[in-house]
Image (cartoon, grey):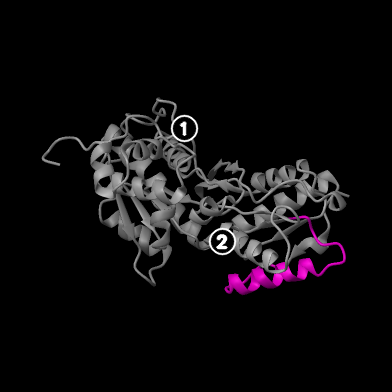
Amino acid sequence: MSGRPVTQTDIAKMLGFSKSTVSRALNGDPRISPETRRKIEEEALKLNYKLVKSPAGSGEQPEAAGKALPGIKTITALVRNPALRSFYSEAFLVISEYGREASYKFDIDQAPEGETIPSGVRRCLQNGADAVFLFTREEIGEEDACRLQELKAPVILIGRHVEGKSAAVTFDDYAVGVLAARYLYRLGHRRIAYIAGPLHSTSQRERLAGFRMGLERLGCYNSIYFSPPVGDDVVGDVRIRVQQLLSLSRPPTAIWALNDFAAGIAIATIQMAGLSVPGDISVMGFDRNHLAASVSITTFDFRCSELGRQALYLLEGLVRGVVKSPVRLCVVPILIEGHSTGPPPAAGAE
């Protein structure tokens, strides 16, 4: 840009969006779809755009912003799955922006296929990183977690944790499960089903536990409505689970699916059976992807920008000796109400 600061107008021209759309996206306006927001944030990160307001839209920078972190000149995000670059783009933008304020460099490193987690972290440190944020969908074993803790440099897990063995920032999946149960109950539902993801994932296990506990406290948990976890064939498995639920003598009036993609499949299966959503059955997802925005699925927003801020807070605490590992900070996703949920039909409220 000829040496001048990048503006929102520059980003708008590069992507073919209006300046107002770019402005809303960078300030966290919920009217902007997740897909559009991620495109804009990725372009802003690529162009080294300097945010004027904090991602929370408060106009104030968090305490960590603008402060030099002792001994930290380079932070590297080690990304274990290419898809996570898009998913966590909001977090990357926050970390990069605060880096310009606190005078540290922020790099994103894509892990090569087959590289172990400890090897990848050591490689980042050998390449000059003073701290590593580990972004992964894999479950991390206790042995690997202990190896990471033995390193002199701080390593913070993002989206995953090892109980009592890691420094981590994650989503509060248990709390989300409880919130989901309360939301559907308040709508009037009592026959509530859940289609879970693979339970080798700590996030899926915690979400399941929170949802079940929430329903138990409300007096409407019924194991018959809790389907076996889906496997690798998400489309086929979700379709089968929904068909099984619909075949019950008293089918559920609400279904919570493991994510928005699964929720979309559930909606299609319900409609193919001649039923309506949400007239006959309400469906709720989780992760607020582009599908949720396009078909208005009720879902939860991960708040990845807040995840990035909390990672910086934790890093500052670790390097200043204010907190010690193991430690875990949690971010609670926010319910985004769409058109896929509503009150149950009159005969299904009991």
| Comparing labels 2 and 1, the label whose residue is closer to the camera | 2
Residue range highlighted in magenta: 228-254
Q: Eyeballing the image, is 223 above or below 46?
A: below
Q: Sequence-wise, which precedes: disc 2 or disc 1?
A: 2
Q: Is residue 68 left or right of residue 308?
A: left
Q: Is residue 217 left or right of residue 206?
A: right
Front in this rendered view, residue 246 or 327: 246
Name the spot of residue 314 as percent of width and height, x first. 46, 39
Q: Is residue 199 visible?
A: no
Helix, strand or loop at mark 1: loop
Q: Is residue 257 left or right of residue 317?
A: right
Residue 245 painted magenta: yes
Separation of marks 2 and 1 at Cα, in angstroms = 41 Å
| Residue most extreme to the front | 274
* Amino acid at the residue labelled 1: Val
Q: Is residue 2 visible?
A: yes
Q: Which residue is mark 2?
A: 261
Task: Point out the image quarter for the N terminus.
Answer: top left
| Residue most extreme to the left | 2
Q: Determine which quarter of the picture holds residue 334.
A: top right
Helix, strand or loop at mark 2: helix
Answer whether labels 2 and 1 touch (C-beta < 8 Å): no
Residue 53's label in the rendered image is none
Q: Eyeballing the image, is 190 above or below 1?
A: below
Q: Which residue is mark 1?
A: 322
Name the spot of residue 281 as percent of width and height, x first. 74, 56
Residue 242 painted magenta: yes
Seen at 39% across and 28% down, the residue is 61
Q: Is residue 319 left or right of residue 296?
A: left
* Amino acid at the residue labelled 2: Phe
Q: Determine which quarter of the picture holds residue 226.
A: bottom right
Name the spot of residue 192 as percent of width and height, x first. 78, 54
